[in-house]
Each structure stands twice: as C-alpha cells, then as structure tokens.
Image (spheres, grey):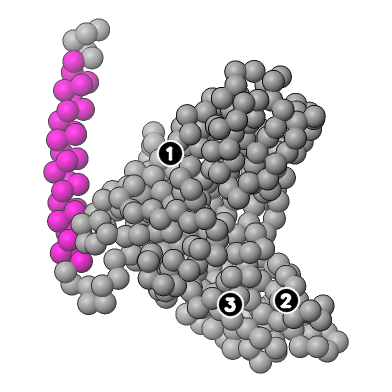
Amino acid sequence: MSEKLTQYRTQIDALDDELLQLFNRRAALAQQIGHLKENGVVLRPEREAQVLRRLQDQNAGPLGNEAVAQLFTEVMSQCRALEAPLTVAYLGPQGTFSEQATLKRFGSAVQGEPCATIDDVFNAVESGAAQYGMVPVENSTEGAIGRTLDLLLNSNLQICGEVMLQVHQCLLSNENELSVIRKVYSHPQSFGQCQGWLNAHLPHAERVTASSNADAARLAAEESYAASVGGVQAAEHFKLKVLAQNIEDDSRNTTRFLVIGKQDVAPSGKDKTSLVLSAANRPGAVHDLLTPLAKHGVSMTKLESRPARSGSWEYVFYVDIEGHQADAKIAAALAELKQAAAFVKILGSYPVAV
C-alpha cells in the first residue's frame, strides 16, 4: 500500500513540475501580448470568456466545469497582473457577496476597492479610481435591485460582463445557541430571501436592516444575543460562529451581478445585450417596442419595468436580449427599435456568464 502511494505521489510531483513550467510559459506569453497592446486595456472580457468556454467544452473530468472555470480564472488573473494592476470597486465592506462575485470573476490577483454604497461603486469607476465595478442587479428570489437600474440609466458607464453567484445564507453570531438570539441584522434583500426560515426559527427576534450583510455581521459581532444573515466569508472575516447554514428559502437562490466600466466589449460568440427604453405616449406603443425584436428573430431574456422618475406615471423598460449589438440581426432590430421608441439607450454588450 505504501509503495503504491509513493508511486502516485511521485507522479503528482512530476506533473506539478510540468504544470509550473507551463504556467510560467503562459505568463511569459501574456506579458508579450501586453507589450503589443497599444491602448493599455488589460482586460479583454470576450477573450477570457472564449478561453473558459473552450476549456469547459474540452473538459473530460473528473474535475467539473465550475472547478475548471475557477482554476483558469485564477491563472488568467495572475497572468493579467503581470501586465498591470487591476482595481475593481464593489459594494463593501469586505465579506460581502459582492466581494465574492468580484473574486469569482477577476481572481485573487486584483485590487478590491470596497465601497459603502452602489452609488460609490459607480463614482469610483467614473472618476477613474477603479477600472471596473461590481454591482448586484437582481436576485432570483427578491427581484431587481432598483438603485442599480436607476444608476445604469443615468451613467455613461457600460456593462462589461455579468456574474451569476449562487447565494447561500447563514445565521452568524457570537452565541452558541439559536434559542438566545433576540435580534437579527441583515440587508433587506437577504431578509427577503430568508423570511420563511426566520419566521419558523426566530419568530420573536427583532429584525434590523443594515447597509450590507458584512455590516450586519460587524454589528452582530459587537453585541450579545444578536445574529446576522450573511455568507460564510462574513463569518470568517468577523470571527463569528455559523449557527445555521443554507437558511435561504429557495436552495437555487442566485444573485446576478454586473461588471461596469468604460470599455466596449467585442463579440465573444455567446453574448447578451442590455438596453433601456421608453414608449411613446400613444396606444399600442409598448407592443411596438417588442415588434422589431420578434421581426428579426431576437430572443428577449428579460423585461423589467421601472418608474421613470418623471413624476407623471411614466415607465422605462430594461431589456436583455441574446446576442451582441454588432451582430447583423441585433443591429437591424436596434435600428428599427430606435425609430419606434421614445428613448433607447444601449447599456452594453458582453459575454454571457460562464
């Protein structure tokens, strides 16, 4: 048994030596590509999406596709850092799901910039303090994040990518027993995701909203008989115990995040285009907005209405469609849509989350 184990370990050591050489060869090539870039743009979302999809298509296991994506995201992150440092602003503080989404998309070789509000994330990117921002836009249980949609409408930033993060909520506390908890802190979205569990297990505990789940964890860490709703990363950061895991009411609970920046993203082969529009004030106007998409065979994956903030009961519509704005049928549909709509703004074309 020990001889067989030694043989396997020897083979692993040899493979590790080979991997080390290959990683460094890849990094050297990435450096050379960086020298050839004339505009100084380090991140190419379309290229990174193509790399991950190709590797997943070739993956024969036993590693799953998610593990392959995670491994090679980290490889690309380390190689990208050799070209230039990359700063990404996210809804902080440390320990939030926004930070987790940032690491999932960009890897660990990125400079994270935690911000107090979603507005601050947009401001950091607009001012140049960060090259990109990571903001939540919708949750599968609680729906759209209105503030993100409002800021997208008025900002000059582009959507450069998306991240789908499966969200597992936990109950965190300094205490050892669930029965002593008298107060629970959480972001309102997370309260909504876990209200069934909280009603069943902590029906008499006071619920107090916080600006983020990380801030909720900080408050719970400073108080006796208190708990917070959040992820495992928040428990680790604030040294809290996990009293209960997976307390979200829907086990498929997923939050979609958007990467925002000043960059137009080229087609990757599997893309999504987001836009916001409003209808003219006449009968059938909303129907007319959808006609160009149907006419050109464009699939719509999302339609979200939002008050236009004009005070006159007008609405804007946020739409996601399959394809890139450079695709012929998308371009034709958008051209006709601009004739039919009172207002159209393309928020960006970007790779579908890998």
Which sits in the foreground, 32 or 117? Answer: 117
Tell me how far mark 1 sits from mark 2, CA to CA: 46 Å
Pinpoint residue 197: horizontal percent, then vertical percent. Answer: 73, 32
Which circle marks residue 229 in the picture?
A: none
Amino acid type, residue under disc 1 in the picture: Gly
Which residue is disc 2 drawn over? 309
Q: Secondary structure at mark 1?
A: loop
Using residue 244 as the reference point, say whether residue 157 is left or right of it. Answer: left
Using residue 154 as the reference point, say whether residue 233 is left or right of it. Answer: left
Pinpoint residue 187: horizontal percent, then vertical percent. Answer: 64, 46
> Most prominent secondary structure in the magenta stretch?
helix
Which residue is disc 3 drawn over? 154
Mark 3 or mark 1: which comes first in sequence?
Answer: 1
* 1 vs 2, front mark: 2
**Relative vertical location of residue 278 with respect to residue 139 in this rendering, above or below:** below
Which residue is disc 1 drawn over? 64
Amino acid type, residue under disc 3 in the picture: Asn
Residue at the outermost right position: 283
Which residue is drawn at the image coordinates 52% and 28% (left, top)? Answer: 240
Pinpoint residue 85: horizontal percent, then vertical percent. Answer: 27, 59
Marks counted in the figure total 3
Look at the image and say whether residue 75 sits in the magenta stretch. no
Residues tagged 1 and 2 counted as in contact (Cβ below 8 A): no
Magenta stretch in the rendered image: 6-34
Q: Residues within 10 Å of mark 3 (few under 14, many from 20)?
A: few
Q: Quadrant of residue 310?
A: bottom right
Q: Secondary structure at mark 2?
A: loop
* Residue 166 visible in this rendered orientation of the protein: no
**Relative vertical location of residue 275 with respect to residue 102 in this rendering, above or below:** below
